[in-house]
Image (cartoon, grey):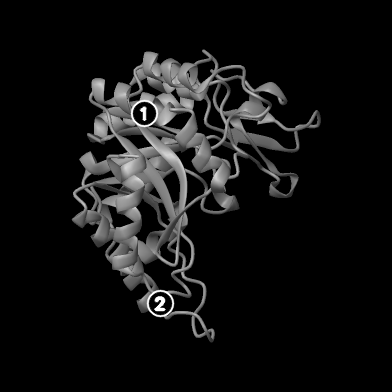
Amino acid sequence: MGLGQAAWHLKETPYADYTWTEYIDNHLKMGIRNFVLGHITITESRIEFGGGARMRQEWQETGAFKYLRRNVIAKGGRILVDIKFTDFHRTVFDETVFLEEVAEFVKEFPVDGFRILANLEYKYPGIRGYKSEQEYFGSVKALLKTIRKLNKILAIWFKGSSWAEIFKHELGSLADINFLSLDIRNDTDIAVFNTDRYAEAVLLNASWAGMAPDKIILSIPLAAYGSIPRLGSYGYRAIVLDHGADPEGDGVVPGNSEQTNFYYFFSQKRGIDKIHLARDRGLHGISVESDRRRTYVDLKPWSPRSLTHALASNV
């Protein structure tokens, strides 16, 4: 089993007191050897850096990618890059354009594969100017099949609210690796999303969709949700530092003195429980899941109180 860490978007805020080299070294020392870097988007079949020119410049100038790749290869690990398609509801995937873009990208950043963030909820039936559902998912499948032709690892990151589309369009058996998010589907999941029972339900859907256990990675979110949803959500770091949650506890903390609102999150204990579940089920591994806006983040990953540290120490 392996642990993947979504390690690379922007430096943590407030400003981090470490260099990229120190950041990478500290992850490697914990035994983490597989990384998902992000993020990148596909618009009109062209690759764009999610952070724009600044992000690309940082990747190029710091030498961090080369340093990471050299060390990951030495440890027998893999590097994937996270990609989100943005406009398949309006445009048709162009394989020729995408292959040209990928060829240029991998010259700069020779990654081992691509993880597609599957935005699978089709919301535009019959709206003028938008593609039909069949055309939309035709582009999704074309993208996946094109990546397969590149002799690269094909991974898909599935969110829990998309199972109907996964079943209908037979997307469950296409990838080498399936990242299954344990994030909530709706507000009714808040009090249970960190439980083994919830993970078991996700795995049952995955089995029905044709996913082999050894191709599944459970993706553990760094989010904390309130039992009164309108009062907002936080990340792991905020729920520990600002709300006093116990990292080693059961993954719940009162949100106010009256105890009328509770925040539920993946504590270290809840995360380690999923490692045992993954082992029992013969899964590929475990990963830590942040969000692209960096709303939900960990403590310093090598801090003994962090979720990443707990998972890496128990894999």
Q: Quadrant of the C terminus?
A: top left
Q: Which residue is mark 2?
A: 133
Dot 1 or dot 2: first in sequence order is 1
Front in this rendered view, residue 305 or 132? 132
Residue that appears at 38% across and 66% down:
165
Could you say where residue 109 lies in the image, as x and y percent from the top left?
35, 40
Task: Residue type at mark 2: give it.
Answer: Glu
- Splitting the image into 4 quarters, where does residue 246 fall? top right
Q: Quick check: 232 left or right of 5?
A: right
- Splitting the image into 4 quarters, where does residue 242 fall? top right
Instruction: Say if 43 sits above or below 135 in the image.
Output: above
Instruction: Say if 79 sits above or below 20 in the image.
Output: below
Q: Quick check: 2 left or right of 256?
A: left
Residue that appears at 38% across and 43% down:
81
Q: Quick check: 126 left or right of 255?
A: left
Q: Label 1 vs label 2: CA separation? A: 41 Å
- Splitting the image into 4 quarters, where does residue 75 fall? top left
* Disc number lying in front (1 or 2): 1
Q: Is there any visible trace of residue 221 in the rendered image? A: no
Front in this rendered view, residue 293 or 71? 71
Residue that appears at 39% across and 20% down:
312
Could you say where residue 224 lies in the image, as x and y percent from the top left?
61, 36
Front in this rendered view, residue 80 or 183? 80
Q: Which residue is mark 1?
A: 66
Query: Is disc 2 surrounded by few (<14), some (14 to 19) or many (20+) residues within 10 Å?
Result: some
Query: Is disc 1 surrounded by few (<14), some (14 to 19) or many (20+) residues within 10 Å?
Result: some
Task: Residue type at mark 1: give it.
Answer: Lys
Q: Secondary structure at mark 2?
A: helix
Q: Secondary structure at mark 1?
A: helix
Instruction: Say if 183 sits above or below 303 in the image.
Output: below
Q: Is there any visible trace of residue 259 in the rendered image? A: yes
